[in-house]
Image: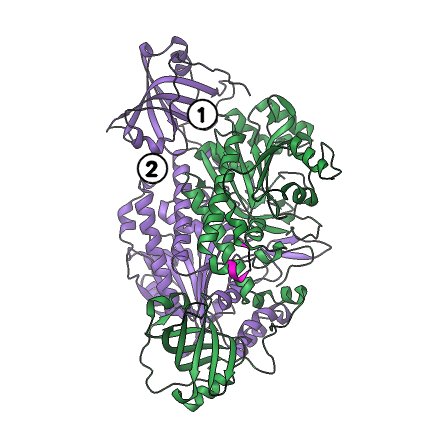
Chain colours: A green, B purple
C-alpha cells in the first residue's frame, strides 16, 4: 500500500517516536505519535484530532495558520480510524484526560478510511450482535479496550502471585483421554486413525500428579465446556488458573484463595485505575475487598437462603439467584464450604467427622458475580478413591495412573480453580462475561 | 487414609515447616520438611535418607542412638517415594548438594510405598515408552523436574519481557472457523448442531486485529498441528508465544526477536543454574548467545549450503539437515530473511524491490536445535491482500474481517511466533521436545 496522502512540513527533523503513555517524559519536546484518528472536533481555524495509539489517547491541536495549507486540509477532512503519524510539541494541559496535549507541526496519513465504506462502529448505539460480528474492530472502543487491559492485569497478577509463592507452572494437556467430571459437556476431537480425544475441562487430575513432583503447582490455560446453555456467565472456551498444593488441607486452600483474591483486587485497583474509570466501575466496592472473607458452611448457607425466602433444600446446589441472595449482605466474597458429597465430583475428600459432606469450598463474589473459585481437599486414600470411582461408574482402567498417585507417596492435598472471565467481569463491573475475553466463543458464536 | 506408621518423639515442639529451598534462612534451627523419600543410604547405625519436597533435595542424617528405636527402624526400612515429614536441625555442610544437611530428631511417615508394588521408576535404565507411560511419576525424576522448571522460567521470562516492553496480552481464540495456513493439518472439532470448528494453529490473524486496538500485543497459548510426522521436533499440541506490532517493519521484528531471545537466555542462565547442572547442559555455549546475531538473506544461505555440499536449490525450504549445516559455524542463532514468497504464507509482505521474495525471517538456533522463531512483515495493502487470497484459493468470505483491517486504518506491521518447546529443548540441551512439556501429545501418544 502506498499512502493515500503523504504530506511533509519543511522542518520535519527527526522527532523521537513515542507512545502516548510515555508523554510525561517528553513534556515540552517535539515528538512523533503513530496511531489512529479516534475523533475530530473542528472549530473554525483550529481542528482538534484525538489520536489513540493503543497505549492511550491524546488531544492534538492543529492551528491553520501554523501549518501548510495541505496538511491542515488533510487533517480537517480526515475520517474516523484513519491511520496517521502526528508530529508536534507536547504541552502539559491539566484539563486534558492524560494531562497533555500535542501542538501539531506535521501530519502523515498512512491510510485514509474511505467515506464510501466508513468505519462501521460509530458513537450511536449498536446491538450486541452487530458489535460481536465486528469484534475485530470493537476491541478498539474505549470500554472494550479497558476491559482487555484489566484482563491482562488479572492474568499477570495471578502469575506473579503464584510465581512469588513457590508455585511451579506445570502446563496440563488440552487433549485428554478421559473426563474430569462426566462426559456430556466434553468437546470431542478426531485424533489420528479413529482415536478420539477430548478437550480439557480442568487440569486438576494432572495437577495432582504434578504436586507430588513439585510440591506446589499451577496450570493456566484455556478450558472447554460444551454446555448448551446461553447465559451471561457461560462461554464454551474460557481460561482457568488452577493452583494445587501437596501437604495442604481445606483450611490452607481457603487461606491461599483468599490471599490471592485480595492480591489481585489490589493490583487491579493500583495498576488499572484509568481503565476502571473508563468502565465506570465503582471502585469503592472493590476497595472493601479485604481479609477476612466471611466463611460459612453449606448448612449455614442453606439456612440463610431459606430465611431470605429461597426454596432451596439441603442437598441441592445453589443457582445464580441463590448465590446473589447469599452474598447481598456482604461487601466481599463469601466462602461456603462442606457441600453435600452428592453434588460434588468424585475426588473430593469427605469430612472425617461427617462423611456426607465434602471438604470443598466455593468462593462467591459479591454484587451478583457468582462463583469465581471452586476447590477443596482431594481424597488421598487409595481404597476410598477406588470405591468412589466404582460408585461413579468411572472406567477404572482410565484412572490407573491417577490411582498411582495414592500408591506412591500419597499426602493430603488440595487446590482450586478460578475462571479468569468471571473474575474480570467482577473487576470491570461487566454484566456479561462475553466482554472479558477478546474473541468469545458461545453456543451461537464462533466468529470472527 | 490414616498413616500406616505415625511415630512421635517425646520433645516434638512446633518446628516451622519450611521448604528445602529455604534452608539457608534456617541454619542451626529445628525445622520440619514435608516430602518424599528419594533415596536411602545405610551405614550401620546411621541412615542417610535423601528427601525431596519439590523445591529441592536434602540429605538427612539419622543416628540410631539419638532416636527412639521405632523411629529409626521405620526410617531404615522405608521404601522409595514414601511420603514423610522429617523434623530435625539444619546444619551447614559445604560438601552437600544444597549446602545443608538435616540432623533428624523425628520422622512421621504418611504413606509407605508397599514392597509388593514398589515405585516403578528405579535407577536402572528404562525405555522411553515405559517412562512416557509413567509420565505422571517420571516428572519426579531429577532431569525431568529440572526441564520443567526451565520451561517455567522461559515462559515467565517471555511474559516479563513483553509486559515490560509495552505489549498487551490479548488471548486469541482456540476455536477458529478458518485456517491460517491450509487445512490439512487442522484438528476438527464437532461444535453444536453440525457446526465444525478447528483448533488454532496460530493466533496471528487475530493479533493483526488486536494491534490496531493496542499497538503492540502478544498471544500465548496452546496451538495444535495434526501432522502425521513422528520426529524429535514435533508435538500435536504445543505452546507458542506470538508478539505482533503495529507500525513495525521487518527490521523491527528482527530487532525485537533478537532482544527477546538474548533476554530469555540470560534469565535462564541466571535463575536456573542448578537445573542446568542437573541437565548437564554446557552453559558456556549459552553464554555466547549475545548480540548481534548473524544476519543473512535466504539467497546467501542457499549459497552457503551449496558450498557445504547441500543439494538445495533456490526456491526450496530448508530441511532439518540444512538448518544444522547452516548454523554449524556459528555459536548463536542465525537470522535468515527474504525467503521466496512461494514457500511462505499468503500474508507475508513482498520485498518492494524484489517482489518474488517475502519479508519473512526465521531464527535458527545453533547446535542443531533448528528454527525457533518465524515471523516477518505482513501485507498491509488491501488490493494486494485480496489478490493473494485469490491466488491461494482461500475463501474470501471467511477473510472479510481480516480484510477490514486493511480498510480501517491499515499500517505496516509485523511480528513473530516462537514455539516454547523447541526453545526449552535448546536451553536444556534436550534432543527431543517430548521432555520439554509435562504431558506430550504426539502421533501415538495421548496418555496419561
**Residue A342 in the image, given as x and y percentages of width and height:** 69, 31
The reply, left or right, for residue A72 in relation to residue A400 is: left
Q: Is residue A262 above or below residue A302?
A: below
Which numbered disc covers residue A55? none
Q: Which residue is under mark 1? A: B81
Q: Is residue A194 above or below residue A311?
A: below
Q: Is residue A411 above or below residue A97?
A: above
The answer to whether marks 1 and 2 sit on the same chain is yes
Q: Give the distance between the C-alpha atoms of the residues marked 1 and 2, in whole angstroms.
A: 20 Å
Res B431 visible: no
- Looking at the rendering, the stretch of residues picked out in magenta corresponds to A276-282
Residue A431 found in image quarter: bottom right
Q: Chain of mark 2?
A: B
Q: Which residue is under mark 2? A: B278
**Residue A353 in the image, given as x and y percentages of width and height:** 61, 21
Q: Chain of mark 1?
A: B
Res A261 visible: yes
**Residue B143 in the image, given as x and y percentages of width and height:** 39, 37
User: Residue, x 41% and y 49% (percent of image)?
Assistant: B156
**Residue A103 in the image, given as x and y percentages of width and height:** 39, 79
Mark 1 residue element: loop
Which is nearer the eye, B223 or A79? A79
Q: Residue furthest bottom?
A: A69
Q: Residues within 10 Å of mark 2 (few under 14, many from 20)?
A: some
User: Residue, x 53% and y 33% (percent of image)?
Assistant: A414
Q: Residues within 10 Å of mark 1 (few under 14, many from 20)?
A: many
- Mark 1 / mark 2, whichever is N-terminal: 1
Amino acid at each position: 500500500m502506498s499512502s493515500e496522502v503523504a504530506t511533509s512540513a519543511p522542518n520535519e527533523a527527526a522527532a523521537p517516536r513515542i507512545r502516548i503513555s510515555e508523554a510525561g517524559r517528553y513534556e515540552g519536546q517535539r515528538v512523533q505519535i503513530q496511531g489512529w484518528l479516534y475523533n475530530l472536533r473542528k472549530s473554525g481555524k483550529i481542528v482538534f484530532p484525538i489520536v489513540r495509539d493503543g497505549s492511550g489517547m491524546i488531544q492534538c491541536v492543529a492551528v491553520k495558520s501554523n501549518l501548510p495549507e495541505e496538511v491542515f486540509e488533510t487533517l480537517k477532512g480526515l475520517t474516523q480510524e484513519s491511520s496517521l503519524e502526528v508530529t508536534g510539541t507536547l504541552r502539559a494541559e491539566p484539563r486534558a484526560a492524560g494531562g497533555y496535549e500535542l501542538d501539531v507541526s506535521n501530519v502523515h496519513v498512512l491510510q485514509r478510511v474511505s467515506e464510501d465504506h466508513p468505519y462501521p462502529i460509530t458513537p450511536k448505539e449498536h446491538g450486541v450482535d452487530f458489535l460481536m460480528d465486528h469484534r475485530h474492530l470493537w476491541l478498539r472502543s474505549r470500554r472494550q479496550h479497558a476491559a482487555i487491559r484489566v484482563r491482562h492485569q488479572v492474568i499477570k497478577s495471578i502469575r506473579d502471585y503464584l510465581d512469588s509463592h513457590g508455585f511451579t507452572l506445570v502446563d496440563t494437556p488440552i487433549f485428554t483421554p478421559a473426563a474430569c467430571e462426566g462426559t456430556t459437556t466434553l468437546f470431542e476431537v478426531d485424533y489420528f486413525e479413529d482415536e478420539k480425544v477430548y478437550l480439557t475441562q480442568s487440569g486438576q487430575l494432572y495437577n495432582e500428579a504434578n504436586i507430588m513432583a513439585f510440591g506446589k503447582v499451577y496450570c493456566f490455560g484455556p478450558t472447554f465446556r460444551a454446555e448448551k446453555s446461553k447465559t451471561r456467565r457461560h462461554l464454551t472456551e474460557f481460561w482457568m488458573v488452577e493452583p494445587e498444593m501437596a501437604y495442604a488441607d481445606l483450611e490452607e486452600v481457603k487461606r491461599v484463595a483468599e490471599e490471592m483474591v485480595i492480591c489481585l483486587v489490589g493490583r487491579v485497583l493500583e495498576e488499572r485505575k484509568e481503565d476502571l474509570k473508563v468502565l465506570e466501575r465503582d471502585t469503592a466496592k472493590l476497595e472493601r475487598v479485604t481479609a477476612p472473607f466471611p466463611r460459612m458452611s453449606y448448612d449455614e448457607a442453606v439456612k440463610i437462603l431459606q430465611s431470605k425466602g429461597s426454596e432451596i433444600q439441603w442437598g441441592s446446589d445453589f443457582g445464580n439467584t441463590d448465590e446473589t441472595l447469599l452474598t447481598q449482605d456482604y461487601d466481599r466474597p463469601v466462602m461456603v464450604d462442606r457441600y453435600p458429597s452428592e453434588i460434588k465430583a468424585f475426588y473430593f475428600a469427605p469430612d472425617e467427622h461427617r462423611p456426607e459432606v465434602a471438604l470443598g469450598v466455593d468462593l462467591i463474589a459479591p454484587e451478583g458475580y457468582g462463583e469465581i473459585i471452586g476447590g477443596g481437599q482431594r481424597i488421598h486414600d487409595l481404597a476410598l478413591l477406588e470405591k468412589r470411582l466404582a460408585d461413579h461408574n468411572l472406567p477404572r482402567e482410565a484412572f490407573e495412573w491417577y490411582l498411582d498417585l495414592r500408591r506412591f507417596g500419597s499426602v493430603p492435598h488440595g487446590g482450586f480453580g478460578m475462571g479468569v472471565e468471571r473474575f474480570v467481569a467482577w473487576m470491570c463491573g461487566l454484566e456479561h462475561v462475553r466482554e472479558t475475553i477478546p474473541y468469545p466463543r458461545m453456543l451461537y458464536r464462533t466468529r470472527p
